[in-house]
Structure formats: C-alpha cells, structure tokens
Image: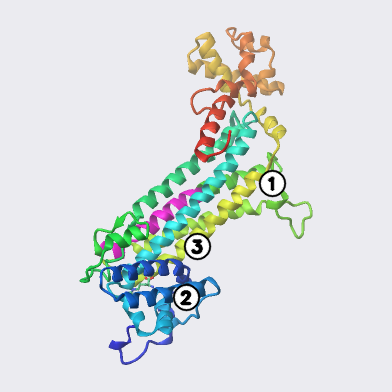
Amino acid sequence: MWGGRFAEGPSAIMREINASIGFDKRLWRHDIEASRVHIAMLAAQGIVDQADADAIEEGLDKIADEYETGGVPEDAALEDIHMHVEARLAELIGPAAGRLRTARSRNDQVATDFRLWVRDAIDVAEQGLAALQRALVARAEEQAETVMPGFTHLQSAQPVTLGHHLMAYYEMLRRDRSRFADARARMNECPLGSAALAGTGFPVDREAVALALDFDRPTANSLDAVSDRDFALDYLMAASQCALHLSRLAEELVLWASQPFGFVKLSDSFSTGSSIMPQKRNPDAAELVRGHSGRIIGALTALSVTMKGLPLAYSKDMQDDKEPVFEAHDLLSLSLAAMAGMIETVSFDAARMRAAAETGHATATDLADWLVREAEVPFREAHHITGRAVRLADERGVPLWELPLDALQSIDARIGEGVFAVLSPDASVKSRKSFGGTAPGQVRKRIEAAKKVLGIET
Ligand code: ARG
C-alpha cells in the first residue's frame, strides 16, 4: 500500500509490531459503512465516476457478506482492517478500488470508524444499564417495607428499608446513563474529510457525509479530528464510574451472602459450588463483577497514558486506543448482564435483616430526636441521655425499645410513654419521611417516578 518509496520490505518483527488486524477487525462493519457513505459522496460531487462508485459499492456489499459469514483471510502485511477491506476490494473489482482512497486517509478513516464503534458501544451500555435499573426497581418495589440495618463504617447505624437501599443503586445508574449520554452527544461529530491531517483539496461535502452517518456535524479542525481520542476516553470514564458502582453492589452481595450476614441467597443460576467443600455456594459472578471493575478502570488508565504527551496530529501510538476500549466494553456488558441476573433472582431473607436491624440499638438516634422534639432537650444533652439508655439496655441484654418506661425515666424523667412509638425499627423507618428518606412512602414515590422514566407499567 505504501511500497513505492521502499526498496526492501519490512522485517517480520516490523510487520508484527505494526499489525492491528488481530483486534481492529472488530471495526469491519463501521469501516464498510463509512466507506459506502464516502464513495457515494465522491460520486455525488463528481470526484469519482458513478460507474466506479457503483462497482465499489457492490464490492463493499460483497465484503460485508464475507465478514458476516466468517471473515476475510488475514495478512499481517496488510496491517489493519482498512487495508484488508481495500485489498479485498481490489481483488474483487480491480484497480477502480483505489479510487475509494480519494480525499481520505486512514487517519480520518480510523477516527471515524472508531467513533461509530464507540457510539454503538454507548448504546449497548445504555440498554444494559436500563435493564439493570428495571431489575432494581422491581425488587425495590417488592421490598419497600422490608426493614434492614443501615450502615455507616459497616456498623449498624439506623434502620432503613431494603427498597431504599436498592434504589440507591438505581440513582447511581441513572447518573451513569447520563454520563454515557453526555459522551455520546459530545462525540457525535464526523472526522471524515480531515484526511491525513490538513484537510483535502478535493471538493468534498463533509456535511452530507456527517449526516449520512448520523453524526450531528463534521468536526471543525482537521488536526484535532485525526488525533482526538477524547470520545474513547469519555466512554472509558463513564464505563469506569459505572463499573465502580457495579463493584460496590457486587461487594454488598458478597457480604450479604456470607454466613455471618445471611441477608441473601443467590440463586443457583448465579452461584457456583466448590470442587472440594460440598457445602459451598460461592458468589463467583459478584466477585467477578467486582474484579472486572479493576480491569475496566485499568483500560481508562492505559488509554489516558497512551494519549498523554502525543504531539499533533496522528501518531501510531494511537493504534493502541482500541484494545482497552474493546476490553472495557466486553467486560462492562457482561458485568451489567450478570448483575441484572443476580438482582432478578436473588432471594432476600427479611427475617435475618430484621433481626440484624434489631441489634446494635439502631434506633438510638430516634430516642435522642424524640427528646429534642417532645421534651425540648438540646440535641447534645439528648445524645448523652440516650447514650446512658443504650448502656443500660446493654447491661440488661435487651434492645433499647424493650427497656421498661420506669427504667428509661430513671435516666431522665422527661422520657414519656410516647417514646415507644418511635423506638422500634418499623417506627423509625416510617418516621424518616423527609424527601429522599427511607420511609416506605417516600421510597414508593421514588419507585413510581423511576417506573415512569423506565417505561414500566404501573
Ligand atoms: N491502524 C491504524 C490505527 O488504528 C490506522 C491509521 C494508520 N495511519 C497511519 N498513518 N499509519 O491507528
């Protein structure tokens, strides 16, 4: 393809380090799509004969069929997907194939193909996120009243509802979706026509090409367009943050499935056994989602470091942009699907959760709040009184709300009968009606809003 200038061919090692076909063949569909649009524009502009353009389009259709049904033989000497398609086209239609290269370089070509690929990857991530959100919302609705301990420092802090806890992840994923949507909107400009780096002298119609490929507009600076990989980094940043959220949920499933917690039982379909310990039921899928997040964040680091310090415009380093993105995409898609499967099929042990919510005096704050509200005690003093009540309950080995009134009154005479209405975990969660709070009524409101957004029938 560039042999004219050289007396000798590249060494085998040069070929090997240069070749990207092993991985960039994943771009074939987008490469052919962009070529079809490019050749149609060249013909419409009178830059290439209609007859040649027709032959090229026919050839491209044939190559698409070949890729669809098993691929095109690979040859490291042809470096990448762009040259494989072009060489195959020449085999099929002869020298007219060379006209496809008019007003185009592999630099604007790969920038375009890869954007198209990442744009599709964003759409796939969006669907995976929506599916997981639907699973979370369905389970949250079913568990809107289920009481469990809420933690800070992984110490029982205040009772919450399981529905509220699950909906916390709905919110994280909602932000993830908006990050992917932002990335998509920002990247949706077409580099084709930037050519090698400086633009082209041919009278191309960049606007028409951009619109035919569903871009919003052509990119505005040819140097930037061929060397910009922000779109891939934006994708990886959104993917990393999403993976980080999945990893937190995965960690909770692993913890909750452990015997000391016993809050959940993962379904058989998302558990594995041990080859040596017959009793084992391991949360491998959750652990792998947690593990994969490391590799997805690694992909972001890899591409960030690759891009750092590259002078304008294209440098071959940028060929290394694809593998991290492909890997992150594959891992994220699988993680989203596995997480949705786990959430849909996990069984919750409401009795264990309630029992845990009843230990650790998780309603101590409710006693302090009651003193502030009903007896006008300053919060600091209420905190101190409550601390003494907790100590007394511990001494007697009972939960706070099982201390008799006279025992509470021996600590502070201002405590009255009404306090029992707030001391049980159920009363505690019901009282937390502030917007965004854990009260079942509040959680249900949020669930209704989420169902509307997700298009779930109510
Ligand atoms: N395979 C190359 C890549 O992915 C295509 C661009 C090659 N451009 C060049 N000037 N050698 O980066």
Mark 2 vs 3: CB contact within 8 A? no
Mark 3 or mark 1, earlier in chain = 1
Residues rendered magenta in the picture = 223-244
- Please give the residue where the numbered disc 3 appears in the rendered image: 327
Q: Position of residue 261 (x, y in %)?
A: 68, 40
Q: CA distance from mark 3 to mark 1?
A: 27 Å
As shown in the figure, which amino acid type bears the numbered disc 1? Answer: Leu
* Quadrant position of ligand 1: bottom left
As shown in the figure, which amino acid type bears the numbered disc 2? Answer: Lys
Secondary element at image label 1: loop
| Between 350 and 58, the one nearer to me in the picture | 58
Q: On the picture, is 268 further left or further right than 81?
A: right
Q: CA distance from mark 2 to mark 3?
A: 29 Å
Magenta span includes 367: no
Q: Position of residue 159 (x, y in %)?
A: 60, 28
Query: Of helix, strand and loop, which mostly describes the magenta segment?
Result: helix
Q: Which mark is residue 266?
A: 1
Label 3 crowd bin: few (<14), some (14–19), many (20+), radius 10 Å: few
Secondary element at image label 2: helix
- Please give the residue where the numbered disc 2 appears in the rendered image: 62
As shown in the figure, which amino acid type bears the numbered disc 3? Answer: Glu
